[in-house]
């Protein structure tokens, strides 16, 4: 590789990075996002009828869903439609609703109510030691 080509790539790389950040809606100068709390901490801060982002035991991104009756579930934090974070969603009538496109999921089965062919990529886990 010639030095001339190397200089062009060095100059081009920051602009490609900036374009990619712009397309993804990210600020390249933003501070690092806060780390997700473990499931137990997220659950302690998650009131009935809400969703919170958390980190699973294996380090994976999960969403803690607490339905109106106090039952809590841990689900993968990725919508099967486009990978958007389900933790940005909300709970409505016992269903987890994706904030991006309004897809509704049953938190106990992972089945998508709005599109029968979609379901969460991993089975939801019910949290049994939650105080109602």
Image: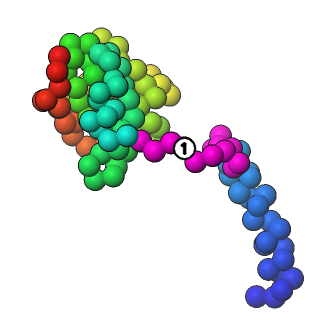
| Residue 15 picture location, percent across and down | 78, 58
Q: Secondary structure at mark 1?
A: loop
Tell me where residue 90 sits by quadrant: top left
Is 13 on the left or on the right of 113, as rendered? right
Residue lying at the far bottom in this picture: please name it. 2
Look at the magenta stretch and give its main secondary structure.
Answer: loop
Residue lying at the far left in this picture: please name it. 128
Tell me where residue 125 sits by quadrant: top left
| Residue 85 picture location, percent across and down | 44, 36
Is 13 on the left or on the right of 31, as rendered? right
Residue at the spot 71% in from the left edge and 57% down from the top edge? 17
Q: Quadrant of the N terminus?
A: bottom right
| Residue 38 picture location, percent across and down | 32, 41
Residue at the spot 81% in from the left edge and 88% down from the top edge? 2
Residue beneath disc 1: 33
Quick check: can you spot residue 10?
yes
As drawn, 122 above or below 47: below
Quick check: can you spot residue 110?
no
Residue at the spot 79% in from the left edge and 72% down from the top edge? 10
Observer-nearest of 110 and 11: 11
Residue 33 within the magenta-colored segment of the rendering: yes
Is 109 on the left or on the right of 104, as rendered? left
Is 55 on the left or on the right of 129, as rendered? right
Residue at the spot 33% in from the left edge and 23% down from the top edge? 46
Query: Magenta residues, as a range?
Result: 24-36
Q: Quadrant of the C terminus?
A: top left
Residue 17 within the magenta-colored segment of the rendering: no
| Residue 126 picture location, percent across and down | 17, 32
Neighbor class of circle 1 (other Cα within 10 Å; few <14, some 14-19, many 20+) is few
């Amino acid at each position: 590789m010639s030095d001339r080509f190397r200089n062009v790539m060095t100059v081009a790389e920051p602009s490609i990075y900036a374009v990619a950040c712009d397309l993804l809606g990210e600020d390249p100068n933003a501070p690092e996002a806060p780390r997700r709390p473990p499931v137990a901490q997220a659950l302690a801060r998650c009131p009935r009828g809400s969703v919170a982002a958390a980190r699973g035991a294996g380090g994976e991104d999960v969403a803690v869903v607490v339905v109106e009756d106090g039952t809590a579930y841990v689900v993968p934090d990725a919508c099967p439609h486009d990978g958007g974070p389900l933790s940005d969603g909300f709970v409505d009538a016992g269903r987890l609703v994706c904030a991006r496109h309004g897809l509704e999921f049953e938190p106990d089965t992972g089945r998508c109510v709005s599109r029968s062919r979609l379901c969460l990529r991993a089975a939801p886990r019910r949290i049994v030691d939650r105080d109602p």
